[in-house]
Image (spheres, rainbow, N blue to C red):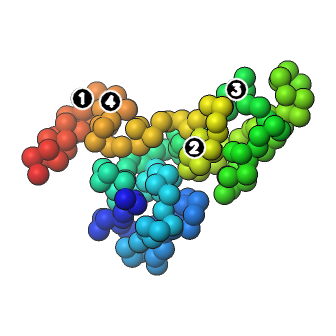
């Protein structure tokens, strides 16, 4: 099942800009739509949606992350075989991965490196790597709002915790 945009969408177009497959369409300030045929269930749209109006593939609300904490590809250098493979580089729709000379690497021709300004955290590279040399941080489970409520991800004191618990109780009651 593809991701879905719900009625609380404000039409800000943040999801449209972040989608690696151009699966999201809509007019500014109106409800947007995700084409289920083009959606690859990567979660890039849900991580940037300000009103948290996107449901993931199991119907859970996606969490919005601050820009500095958005999902991003990370390379495990000792596992990357670099120029012997390049699957992650070939599959990346944003050209966020490239080969870079790594003199201390076991591969003469270098290893993959991530351009954080281009990476959307779409997980295509992670899925294509057969050497477990690349992963997306934070993990996919952290993108789910019900699995990791606010107080677990961003511990708060006083009223913040109380408000988060009240919202969680209201959601559970409905």
Splitting the image into 4 quarters, where does residue 137 fall? top right
Q: Residues within 10 Å of mark 2 (few under 14, many from 20)?
A: some
Instruction: Kindly identify the residue that appears in the image at 47 percent across and 68 percent down.
Output: 37
The residue pinned by badge 4 equals 152
Residue 169, position in %: x, y? Answer: 14, 41
Q: Quadrant of the N terminus?
A: bottom left
Is residue 65 left or right of 88 when viewed as pictured? left
Instruction: Kindly identify the residue that appears in the image at 32 percent across and 51 percent down.
Output: 58
Residue 167, position in %: x, y? Answer: 19, 44
Q: Disc 3 to disc 2, how far (Cα)?
A: 15 Å
Q: In the depicted view, which residue is nearer to us: 8 or 76?
A: 76
Q: Which mark is residue 127?
A: 2
Q: Secondary structure at mark 3?
A: loop
Is tag 1's residue or tag 4's residue first in the polypeptide sequence? 4
Splitting the image into 4 quarters, where does residue 54 fall? bottom left
Is tag 1's residue or tag 3's residue first in the polypeptide sequence? 3
Splitting the image into 4 quarters, where does residue 153 fall? top left
The residue pinned by badge 3 equals 79
Q: What residue occupies the far bottom of the structure in this picture?
A: 27
Callout in the foreground (4, 2): 2
The residue pinned by badge 1 equals 158
Is tag 3's residue or tag 2's residue first in the polypeptide sequence? 3
Q: Disc 1 to disc 3, how far (Cα)?
A: 44 Å
Residue 36, position in %: x, y? Answer: 43, 67
Q: Secondary structure at mark 1?
A: loop
Q: Secondary structure at mark 2?
A: helix
Q: Secondary structure at mark 4?
A: helix
């Amino acid at each position: 099942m593809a991701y879905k945009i719900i009625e609380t969408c404000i039409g800000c177009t943040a999801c449209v800009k972040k989608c690696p497959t151009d699966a999201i369409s809509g007019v500014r300030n109106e409800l947007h739509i995700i084409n289920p045929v083009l959606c690859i269930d990567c979660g890039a749209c849900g991580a940037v949606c300000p009103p948290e109006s996107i449901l993931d593939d199991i119907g859970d609300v996606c969490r919005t992350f601050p820009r500095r904490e958005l999902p991003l590809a990370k390379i495990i250098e000792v596992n990357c075989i670099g120029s012997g493979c390049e699957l992650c580089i070939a599959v990346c729709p944003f050209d966020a991965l490239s080969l870079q000379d790594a003199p201390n690497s076991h591969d003469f021709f270098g290893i993959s490196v991530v351009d954080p300004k281009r990476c959307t955290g779409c997980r295509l590279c992670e899925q294509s790597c057969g050497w477990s040399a690349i992963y997306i941080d934070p993990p996919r489970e952290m993108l789910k709002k019900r699995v990791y409520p606010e107080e677990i991800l961003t511990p708060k004191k006083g009223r913040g915790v109380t408000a988060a618990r009240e919202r969680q109780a209201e959601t559970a009651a409905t």
